[in-house]
Amino acid sequence: MPTLKEKLREKIELWRPRTQRLMDEYGDVVVDEVTISQIIGGMRDIKCLVTDISYLDPEEGIRYRGYTLPEVFQKLPKPPGAEYPYVEGCLYLLLTGDIPTEEEVAEVVDEMSKRRILPRYVYDVLDAFPTISHPMAMFSSAILTMSRESFFAKKYEAGMRKQDFWDPMYEDSLNLLAKLPEIATYIYSKLYRGGNRSESNPFLDFGGNFAHMMGISKPYDDVSRLHFILHADHESGNVSAHTGHLVASSLSDIYLSISAMINGLAGPLHGLANQEVLKWLLDVMHKMGGKLPTEVEMKQFVWDTLKAGHVIPGFGHAVLRKTDPRYMIQREFALNHINDEPIMQYVDMLYRIVPPILKEQGKAKNPWPNVDAHSGAIQWHYGVRDYDFYTVLFGIGRSIGICANLVWDRALHYSLERPKSLTTEMLEKIAMGSKL
Ligand code: NMX
Ligand code: MLT
């Protein structure tokens, strides 16, 4: 059986001529036009990135390597007795495009387990943070600190052929991903559990070991597998993926690139929205004195938020134009496992009342819930109630997809990213019909 790395090498060699041919023979073919509102409005919808790891259709949602998320959950091998698949299998799929066999996943589980030990200095860096720090700042810094471990940086300095760039990037990626559960649970125990935590168990898979280190019993191992797989990738244009790609395009190593993408994920319009959702719900609970609001009362809370000029966290999307399938998958899990959780009544009520209100307000192009509207409620149920930790969980998942992308970026020699900027005066001239 070929190892993951051997399989990847084979795939890369087969793929390279396709990219080369597009560049050599079709490099001048026009793909898209750009309007002034796209330039000022956050480059929305401009087709200017390429990835084969995942594709987001506005109506259907994300596909990983051509598979919808329900297909991914159904096809990937699962640990014995588990409801959700190995996270390691998802990494295999994203990297190679193939659904791994049980044996192939076992090899990756073993590889990751061997690489999970964190250098001592990372704990020292985390211990130096004040305990009022945001966990995302700590998570990003811990990853950044490990840049000195990068094989890519060392080999680049020593002189390496461009064809081989992907190889140390792959090694760095596996080394980093294997350590993320340890970093995250250390932060969690330090900030919220007085430093108490279980040591890592090398015989458990990624999701199982994460739950074990969090000290939360079954089915939190499955909750973790579900969460990390669900958040792994969302094509290339979202802030975290794009940041990772941009930073890596200057040949920065994986640690520099993933730390940077984590910083993008930490913004309230992106990953931090899952923390904002819980904060918003708890605020409503507080105002209601713990009593469930009626629909009329809840509608008033939503309108009050909008009238104060704030967004309703967890709703809307830059690309999707339907309810996020990641929301529906979490909803299905919640209906099956935690339906008696009081916070679910709030989430459920918002699911019904927010979209019509956003439609009535008439601003949001997509009034439907996104992934972040649900994830916190599940964590809350299983005892993870320190909601500023939620984006770290998102960050673990997202690192898997971005590492897969960055390995392929190196394999296909994607260039330094450097779009052109214009001045406002230039745009005004273009608007009046002049050429630059
Ligand atoms: N609540 C209130 N207003 C909204 C919302 C919302 N949930 N979503 C969009 N709008 C507003 C938006 O602020 C903008 O207003 P203005 O013209 O005054 O600037 C207007 O509707 C048009 O925005 P869109 O083009 O629909 O959305 P855009 O692509 O700019 O932004 C989001 C997408 C996701 C940033 C936006 O929908 C939002 O702020 N949602 C709430 C935050 C959130 O849930 N983010 C997580 C997204 C998923 N993730 O994990 O990253
Ligand atoms: C994501 O998962 O990255 C978010 O849904 C945001 C996006 O795709 O723009």
Image (cartoon, rainbow, N blue to C red):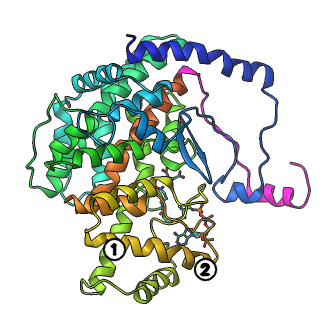
Mark 1, other Cα within 10 Å: few <14 / some 14–19 / many ≥20: some
Q: Is mark 2 within 8 Å of ligand 1?
A: yes
Q: Say which quadrant the N terminus sits in.
A: top left
Given residues 425 and 129, the one toward you in this image is 129
Residue drawn at the location 49% of the way across and 64% of the way down? 369
Label 1 CB sits under 8 Å from any ligand 1 atom? no
Question: Residue 364: x percent and y percent?
Answer: 60, 70
Label for residue 334? Answer: none
Q: On the picture, is 115 further left or further right than 200?
A: right
Residue 426 visible? The answer is yes
Find residue 7 and report its horizontal and vertical position in percent: 45, 15
Q: Secondary structure at mark 1?
A: helix
Circle 2 crowding by C-alpha within 10 Å: few under 14, some 14–19, many from 20: few
Quarter of the image holding residue 346?
bottom left
Counting from the top left corner in percent of width and height, residue 74 is at 42, 39
**Residue where numbered disc 2 is placed:** 361
Q: Which residues are magenta?
A: 411-436
Is 250 on the left-hand or right-hand side of 135?
A: right
**Amino acid, disc 1:** Gln
**Magenta segment: does it hold 128?**
no
In this picture, is 338 found above or below 6?
Answer: below
Q: Is residue 386 in view?
A: no
Q: Quadrant of residue 151?
A: top left
Q: Is residue 413 magenta?
A: yes
The residue under label 1 is: 345
Q: Is residue 425 left or right of residue 58?
A: right
